[in-house]
Every structure is written in C-alpha cells, then in structure tokens.
Amino acid sequence: MPMPQLSRSLISGFFQSLSRAPASAALELGDLSLSYEQLWNYAGRITACLKDVLDPSETVVAVLGDRSVAAYGGILGVLGAGRGYVPLNPKFPVERTLVMLQASGCRTVVVGKECAATLESLLPRLQKPLTLILADPGWRPQASVLPIHRVIPGENLSKTSSPCEPDVKAEDTAYLLFTSGSTGIPKGVAVSQSNVVAYMEYAARRFGIHGGDRCSQNFDLTFDLSVHDLFTCWDAGATLCPYSAQTLTPAALVDELGLTVWFSVPSVAMFASKLGLLQPGAFRTLRWSLFCGEALSASLAEAWQQAANNSILENLYGPTEATIAITWYRWNSATSPAECVRGLVPIGWPFDGQQVCAVDENLAPVPHGESGELCLGGSQVTRGYLNDPEKTARSFVRLKHTGEQIWYRTGDLVRQDERGCLYYLGRRDFQVKVNGYRVELQEIDLVLREAARTELAVAIPWPLSDGSASGIVGVLYGSDPAQDAAIIAACESRLPRYMVPNRIYHFPQIPLNVNGKIDRAKIAEMLTSPEL
Ligand code: AMP
C-alpha cells in the first residue's frame, strides 16, 4: 500500500511555536524556566552534533535521561536530526536497558548527567562501542572501558542547528518503545511519523490546547502517553510542567503550578484521593482532566470531577501499538453513572478516522451487546513488533469481513452498544496494569521461577482496588522462606521496580484449573484470607 504524504512531522509543531512566540515558556522544571528559544538553543546543539556523527543507517537514537533538560532536549534534538528516539529510563535495571539498547540497534546515545551511575554500570556490559553524547557540559562517566567508546562531551556541543523541518518520510520511526513481553523479552513497538502525526492532528482539534495552557507531564518518557504530554503542549506553544520526583504525588502540584491540562493514569488520581486531595473545587485551574492507561472507576471519575469542577473530564483508551489513545468518553456527572458497567467508565467512541471492531475467536464481528476482543484499525495502528514476525502475525491480523486492512488485536474484551459506545470488560490474557504500567505476568513468572529455582512460582497482581493493581506479589510452593530476600533481590536486578514482587507468599499447594494450569484467580481469592 503506498504511504500517504506527510503533512508535518512530530517536531513541526514545536518549530512553529518557536517561530510564533520564541520567548514563551516551553518547559518549567522546578525553578528553571526555558523559553522555546532557549530550549531549542540546547536541543539544536544535539541536532547539529547528531547530523555530524550519525551514519545514514542509524535511524534511531537512544535518549537516557529522566525529567531533565537533557532528556527533553535530547528528544527534540533526535527528532530535529530526522531520527526516531528510543527513551531509556535510568531507574530501570541495567540488564533491561541493555536488552532494549541491543534490540533497538541504537549505536548512539544522548545521556543526561543524572544518568552517570547507570551509564557507568552499563558501559562495561556493552558488547559493541557506542557514540555517547554527553548532553550536559562538565561531566564524564567513570569507567575503565570508556576509551573504547566515542565520547562527545557537552562542552564540545558548540555548533547549533537552525530549526528546520527534518527530511522524514511517513514510515520513518518517530519513537521506539518497549512494552512488557510474556516470553521474558520486552516487545519493541516502532511508531511511525504518520502514526503519531495522525494522533497529533486529531488531538489538536479535540483538545484545542493553546499558548496560555500549562500542561502536566506525569508520564515516564518510556510510556507512550508522555508523547501526548510533550507534543500536544509544544504544538500549541504552551508550557510543559513536569512534576518533580520529590513530590509525593503530582496531583498535589495542580494548584501550585497552576496547571490547566491534566493527564495521568487513574492510579495517580486514586493515590490523590487516598491522600484526601480530591476536595471539591481543589483543582479549579484545570480545564481538561484526561485519564488513560487503565480502567477508570465511576467513583474516582466523579470525585475528580468535583475537585476539578471547571474541567472537562475524559476517559481515553489505547495501547502503545495504536499510538497513545484511540477512543474517548466524556464524563457527565448527571448521565454517566448510569452508563457505567461494573462501576467502570466506558471507553466510548473511536477518534475520527480510526476504526474499532469487537470480534470472536474466529475474528468474525460479534453482534452489538455481546462481548468480543477489541480490534483497532486506521492510521494510528503501527506495523507490528520490532524484529518479531511471529508475534506480529499473531497480533496484527486481517479480519474476515474487511479484506486487506490490518487490525491490531488488543487482547481487551469489550461490549459495544447500539450507539457504538464501547465498554471495557477486562483482558483475555495475563496482561495487567500495575499502577498504570503494562505488565505481562508471565514475564515476572519467568524471572521468579529462575530466582526461586522452582516451576511452581507465580506472580499475582496484588492488592487490587477498583479493578486495578497497586503491586505484585510472588506465590511459591515448595521453597524455603529464608530465600525470600534473595529472590526479591534477583527480581530487582532484572525487572523495573513496578514489576518486582513486594512480598513472597508460600502456599502448601498451588491451585490448578481444569486444564492443569496454575489458577491465578483462585490464588488471588486465597490472598484475601484473613489468616495470611
Ligand atoms: P499501554 O500499551 O501501556 O498503553 O497499555 C494498553 C492497555 O492498557 C490496553 O490494551 C488496555 O488493556 C489498558 N487500557 C488503556 N486505557 C484504558 C482505559 N481507559 N480503560 C481500560 N483499560 C485501558
């Protein structure tokens, strides 16, 4: 199928805002405020350097940074050079970062000084030399292997690049992310310029963000919802306000930062609610309250709506594979409670130009009112998993009634009513959300089993509230409780914090279902026992 012509690229909106209002604030990080001009002044140096050092086969560049000027400037710098960015999180175990770096094929990494320790443990484990662009002047990693790498210190980023539209094609990667994989290896999803431009154009119409807005930046940069944070904000010439890591919860800052646009997973709102922050009228400055990433409960939606009483609240839904979000539902305090199923807010209707279809196991559409697996089609749907034709073939499919069109099978179970409104019913597999993070339980099972040297070990999302999990526990049979600390430490060395079991339980027997498989639902039931 011929690729459509690109009307713009992911960075175009930033450049337009830069030329329209260069002195407006683009980024506020604590006490530091950078205008569009200052931020590009920084990012443009990275672009200029990348243009010098990259060879044409390097289509993606990693950015190792965390809520810093280096991280945001690195992303802009990479996009300005006409490449896709691969965000890496310094808080992830080095082993996982290594897997992502190798799978992405990145040979160049932009690094912020906040990642010095991560870089130092990463460098000795690399099999091939890298080009390291140290985005902050005045520091060098300490590692005996440093000389084998090509290191470009921040002081040398003296030349800047003019803000000109990069030469990119519709199918070029804009960003490459990794999500949890059930076989133990994270799955790479390359989102193309045309995928993300389709989202940005729709979001601009839907949310009408403008230069006076102050937008939240709650999502980790390795999570695709952060792409919405950064680029819907910069497209509009608004100010991006990342919360600082010292804050107990980002919601505590809504008032202090004067935020007008809020976007987070419901878990963040739940935490704010537990801290008693959702008082009526508490978040008066907000004009948009957007939630995505996991099921939103009706009670939480209403409590947030009361707190952010001047805002429009929407529940967005979408997987990384279909670019950020693809359906919407607008909360209405008067009518929505009656539309909720099992206490969950509907996920609503597809964005204009995108398609949804609920299917049975044979990929035939199910009638309205019946449960089916949600399939997604349209310009936001990506082309599959990086270097994994098997998984791609399983999840990116043709449906019987729509000819050659490719649909993404989400694994989400939904019901659609006569009006076309979609209701989220759960998953058909072992993918769960833990505090909004996507987790394949089998990925944790594998690590747990290796660490505990037993086949009878299983990861359970726990505790649960309002249908979402705030942690993971490990349940084992036939192993020694004295090993628990060592097992958890082994998990910590391989899994990101949110996937590591908080606690290990030892059961005298692990329940099996009729197929002889470990029965996770039964175990979750057993965890509620007051004797535990
Ligand atoms: P991710 O790729 O991390 O964005 O995760 C995508 C998955 O998160 C979806 O397939 C759903 O299972 C879940 N999800 C995202 N948004 C919602 C929502 N609004 N309601 C229920 N589940 C959601």
Image (cartoon, rainbow, N blue to C red):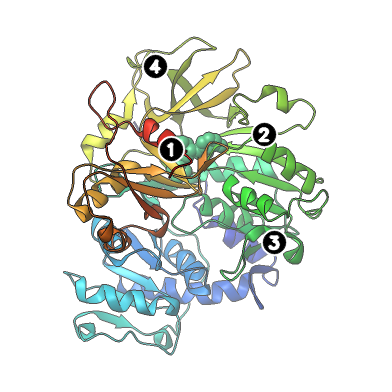
Q: Which mark is residue 298?
A: 2
Q: CA distance from mark 3 to mark 2?
A: 22 Å
Which dot, 2 or 4, sits closer to the camera? 2
Q: CA distance from mark 1 to mark 2?
A: 40 Å
Q: Earlier in the sequence, mark 3 or mark 4?
A: 3
Q: Earlier in the sequence, mark 1 or mark 4?
A: 1
Q: CA distance from mark 3 to mark 4?
A: 47 Å
Amino acid type assigned to the residue bearing label 1 in the image: Pro
> Residue 474 placed where, x, y %?
34, 48
- Quarter of the image for residue 53 reads bottom left
> Residue 184 placed where, x, y %?
25, 48
Mark 4: C-beta under 8 Å from nearest atom of ligand 1: no
x 39%, y 16%: residue: 402
> Residue 78 placed where, x, y %?
42, 65
Q: Are marks 3 and 4 in contact (CB under 8 Å)?
A: no
Task: Name the residue beneath numbered marker 4.
Answer: 402
Q: Nearer the viewer, residue 492 or 452?
A: 452
Q: Earlier in the sequence, mark 2 or mark 4?
A: 2
Task: Name the residue beneath numbered marker 1.
Answer: 4
Q: Are marks 1 and 3 in contact (CB under 8 Å)?
A: no
Which dot, 3 or 4, sits closer to the camera? 3
Q: Which mark is residue 252?
A: 3
**Horizontal side, residue 328 vs residue 132: left or right:** right
Q: CA distance from mark 1 to mark 4?
A: 20 Å
Q: CA distance from mark 1 to mark 3?
A: 43 Å
Mark 2: C-beta under 8 Å from nearest atom of ligand 1: no
As drawn, the residue found furthest toward the top would be: 367
Dot 2 crowding, Cα within 10 Å, few <14, some 14–19, many 20+: many
x 71%, y 34%: residue: 331
Q: Earlier in the sequence, mark 3 or mark 2?
A: 3
**Horizontal side, residue 438 vs residue 247: left or right:** left
